[in-house]
Image: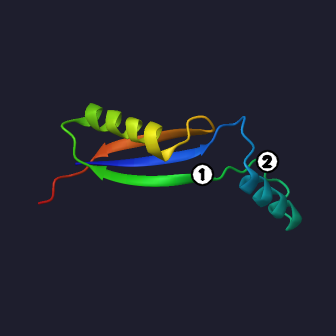
Amino acid sequence: MFKAEIYVSYKPSVLDPKAEVIKNTLARIGDDNVATVSVGKYFELTLTAPDQAAAEAQVDRICDEMLANVNTEAYHFTVKALEAAQ
């Protein structure tokens, strides 16, 4: 079993309106030293796969096909083997 942690956010060239609202609000309440804000999505998947490489390939495919709009979003992930239940 493997656990994947996936982070999806807008590419740097894409305007992130939610992040801009947060940044502007922070400035209004006195936190004007915040230079950038990024809003994204977080996913956790638990999957079975024959090995680490197969799990990573599957997660990459899932991100490309479903979890991220690859035209406007970038993603990165980690895949870790889970300890067998004893």
Give x and y (percent) for residue 81: 26, 45
Q: Amino acid at mark 2?
A: Ala
* Nearer to me, 56 or 73: 73
Q: Label 1, label 2: how many angstroms apart (C-alpha)?
A: 17 Å
Identified by mark 1, the residue type is: Gly
Seen as rendered, the residue at the extreme bottom is 29
Q: Quadrant of the C terminus?
A: bottom left
The residue depicted at 75 percent of the width and 52 percent of the height is: 17
Coloring applied to the structure: rainbow
Reply above or below: 73 against 3: above
Q: Dot 2 surroundings within 10 Å: few (below 14), some, or many (20 or more)?
A: few
The x, y position of residue 60, in whole percent, is 40, 36
Q: Which mark is residue 40?
A: 1
The tag earlier along the polypeptide, 1 or 2, is: 2
Identify residue for label 2. Answer: 35
Quadrant of the rendered image containing residue 73: top right
Secondary-structure class at tag 1: strand
* Disc 2, SS: loop
Q: Residue 70: x and y, percent? A: 56, 36
Residue at position x 16%, y 53% in the image: 84
Let me know if residue 31 appears in the view.
no
Residue 39 visible in rendering: yes
Q: Quadrant of residue 15?
A: top right
